[in-house]
Image (tube, coloured by chain):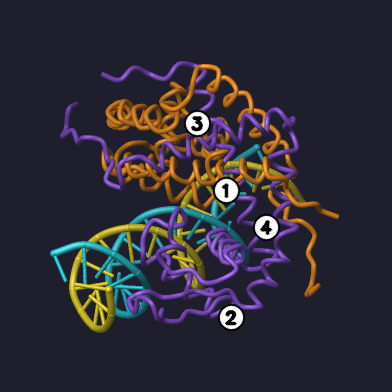
Chain colours: A purple, B orange, C yellow, D cyan
Amino acid sequence: MTSALDPQELGAYFAFMEASSLLSHQVEQHLRAEGDLRYVQFQLLARLANARGQLTMTELADGVVYSRSGLTYQAGLLEAAGLITRAPSAEDERATLVTITDAGLALFARVLPGHVEVVRSLLFDPLTGDDVDHLGDIMQRIRDHMRAQPPRSAAPRKRRSTG
Amino acid sequence: MTSALDPQELGAYFAFMEASSLLSHQVEQHLRAEGDLRYVQFQLLARLANARGQLTMTELADGVVYSRSGLTYQAGLLEAAGLITRAPSAEDERATLVTITDAGLALFARVLPGHVEVVRSLLFDPLTGDDVDHLGDIMQRIRDHMRAQPPRSAAPRKRRSTG
DNA sequence: TATTGTTATACTCTATAACTATA
DNA sequence: TATAGTTATAGAGTATAACAATA
């Protein structure tokens, strides 16, 4: 049996969903306007920029995308735009090594300040330092909890026409 | 000038984005499997179920959707599925009044317990009661702050090829 | 003129399955 | 056999602009 969410939980859930929807919408808007990037693509560039080297498609996909073909698609766009290159790996010839180009680094650098400003003004502006600590702590626990969850087949037990 | 996010903020931001992505992905999965609903549609049904009456398209759209045609599209699907009806308003003949049908109420009721369970197990499971209070408080402030933000044209000042 | 809502259209993204190639 | 990645394909969702009708 499942009992309903109490008012505290309900409020937190709805606010969480709406806040994240609003934030990612604005972030998408900004990245698109400023650099013709989707947030996924921004994430990929960010990883590659930090990696200071090459990543395989699989490493790149982790936590960013929910299907392999989705990553191939986005990587294709980034490659076509000259922001990354792909090359076969020598160590494991099944793997593809992805590298960020100078243009990719330049675009990332160009877009980053505005991105930060959007996040700051929308997410952090109404928060105190303590709030930020709480938020980080809570969100990291939630994220880790969800990452640890049984794979992608978590569709709760089916019920056929119970009504 | 925009200064970078400090490590606390960065951690909070990334965790927030990933957590919300994971949660909404799982929620979508569940609703689709259980009732062939997208989360948007679930939200619309939820509003109509609570409204205990009729809402106009505009009222229904508020906070759920980012374009009018998007709502028309979703409402069309819900109507085709027999979950809502649409009828012209007598008071204001421009308006469309939306009503949830018995089938809509039944589907909503059927799907709700599983939805709650998904949210509970993914979002609230790793949290204490205090965490929930904090989360609710913080999220509501963020949401309200974003709602109050200048409309939809908030694309921060353009820069042309500064590099 | 502004507002409510729909339509047409074009585009982006996603995901499944089939496939190739290497481990 | 399992893993890495791509391709083909098909479907769903989104947004813009043009439109009709009422306020």
Indicate the amino acid at tag 4.
His
Q: Amino acid at mark 3?
A: Leu
Q: Secondary structure at mark 2?
A: loop
Between label 4 and label 3, give the one nearer the viewer. 4
Chain of the residue on which disc 1 is drawn: B
Instruction: Have a look at marks 4 and 2 and say if they share a chain.
Output: yes
Mark number displayed over residue A82: 2
Same chain? Circles 3 and 2: no
Give how far apart the Cα atoms at labels 1 and 3 are: 18 Å
As measured in the structure, the alpha-carbon distance from the residue carrying label 1 to the one carrying label 2 is: 31 Å
Residue B64 place in picture, x, y as percent? 53, 40
Q: Are marks 1 and 2 on the same chain?
A: no
The residue mark sitting in front, 4 or 2, is 2
Mark 4 element type: helix
Distance between the alpha carbons at the discs numbered 3 and 2: 49 Å
Placement of A66 over or under B22, stated as above or below: below
- Residue identifier under label 3: B55
Q: Tell me the SS state at disc 3.
A: strand
In the foreground, A103 or B67: A103
The numbered mark, 4 or 2, whose residue comes first in the sequence reads 4
